[in-house]
């Protein structure tokens, strides 16, 4: 591959996407691909500091402020980690990206979707994932997986998570070419095999 590949992993909290991302990294590395892992919020350095605020700040956070923090982190992740890696032919696996902001801040918090799309474009400079996996699962099951030890976002409640899930499914309907919905209630191995099958068309 001359230009690399940008793959994002999405879904409600507790959907199992991080496990799948690690399994895919192992698989691709064994096959000899150069793989870079990152996440939003986070990645490294400043991104991880923003993550700390977003997930653990215990005072009131306005919905708009929350969105801007996610977007600031995204701009940093794209410019510092994702773009340089793609330009040098690597495969980037990113745990959450623009669709999270649409699903969580748009569908979940109820912020204007057009504005979010516009802000996402500003943050990414127009760079879009080549492929996005949405790990879909009912929110009762996913919240059970998350357990008692919830961070600030996970504490927003089951109704919120349901709206987020709906948001992802709506997004997938709008962009079926890019967004592939995977049934995340299946076993880890079955899901991994589905991921590999889908990816085979891209590499
Ligand atoms: P995640 O890293 O998946 O959390 P965990 O480590 O618990 O698996 O995601 C962090 C949280 O941030 C998650 O609840 C989703 C939320 N989030 C948004 O609300 N908007 C965004 O744009 C992003 C990237 C994440």
Image (cartoon, helix red, strand yellow):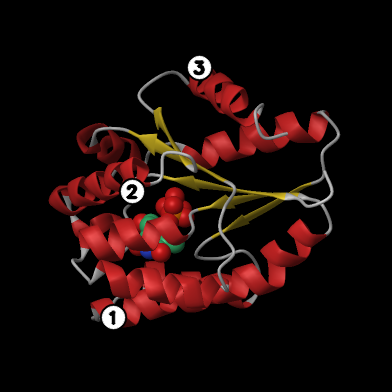
Task: For label 1, count other residues whose C-alpha is less than 10 Å away and answer few (under 14), some (14-19) or many (20+).
Answer: few
Q: Position of residue 130 (x, y in %)?
A: 59, 48
Residue at position x 81%, y 29% in the image: 30
Q: Position of residue 32 (x, y in %)?
A: 86, 34
Res. 111 mark: none
Placement of 100 over or under 68, stated as above or below: above
Please rate how many residues cluster around mark 2, counting C-alpha atoms within 10 Å: few if below 14, some from 14 to 19, many from 20.
Answer: some
Q: Residue at x 69, y 38 (%)?
A: 25
Q: Which label's residue is closer to the chain start, 1 or 3?
A: 1
* Residue at left offset 67%, top offset 35%: 202
Quarter in which the N terminus is drawn: top right
State the separation of the CA atoms marked 3 and 2: 24 Å
Callout 3 secondary element: helix
Secondary structure at badge 1 equals helix
Residue 70 is at least partly visible in this image: no
> Which is nearer the eye, 108 or 61?
108
Disc 2 within 8 angstroms of ligand 1 (CB): no
Spatial distance from mark 1 to mark 2, Cα to Cα? 21 Å
- Position of residue 117 in the picture relative to residue 59 (left or right): right
Q: CA distance from mark 1 to mark 3?
A: 39 Å
- Element carrying mark 2: helix
Which numbered mark, 1 or 2, is in the foreground of this view?
2
According to the picture, the residue beneath numbered tag 3 turns out to be 190
Disc on the earlier residue, 1 or 2: 1
The relative height of residue 181 versus residue 37 in the rendered view (above or below) is above
Using the image, tell me which numbered label, if any, was put on residue 64.
1
Residue 25 in view, yes or no: yes
- Give the residue displayed 55% in from the left and 65% down from the top: 42
Task: Please report contact status of discs 3 and 2: CB closer than 8 Å, yes or no.
Answer: no
Outermost residue on the left side: it is 159
Q: Is mark 1 within 8 Å of ligand 1?
A: no
Q: Which mark is residue 171?
A: 2
């Amino acid at each position: 591959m001359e230009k690399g590949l940008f793959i994002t992993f999405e879904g409600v909290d507790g959907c199992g996407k991080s496990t799948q991302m690690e399994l895919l990294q192992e698989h691709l590395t064994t096959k000899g691909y150069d793989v870079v892992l990152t996440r939003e919020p986070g990645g490294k350095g400043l991104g991880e500091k923003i993550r700390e605020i977003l997930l653990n700040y215990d005072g009131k956070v306005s919905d708009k402020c929350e969105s801007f923090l996610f977007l600031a982190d995204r701009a940093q992740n794209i410019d510092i980690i994702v773009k340089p890696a793609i330009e040098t032919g690597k495969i980037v696996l990113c745990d959450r990206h623009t669709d999270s902001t649409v699903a969580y801040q748009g569908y979940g918090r109820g912020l204007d979707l057009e504005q979010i799309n516009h802000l996402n474009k500003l943050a990414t400079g127009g760079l879009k994932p080549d492929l996005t996996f949405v790990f879909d699962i009912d929110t009762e099951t996913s919240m059970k997986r998350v357990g008692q030890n919830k961070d600030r976002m996970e504490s927003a409640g089951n109704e919120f998570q349901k709206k987020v899930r709906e948001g992802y499914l709506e997004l997938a309907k709008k962009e079926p070419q890019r967004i592939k919905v995977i049934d995340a209630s299946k076993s880890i191995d079955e899901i991994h095999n589905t991921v590999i099958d889908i990816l085979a068309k891209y590499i």
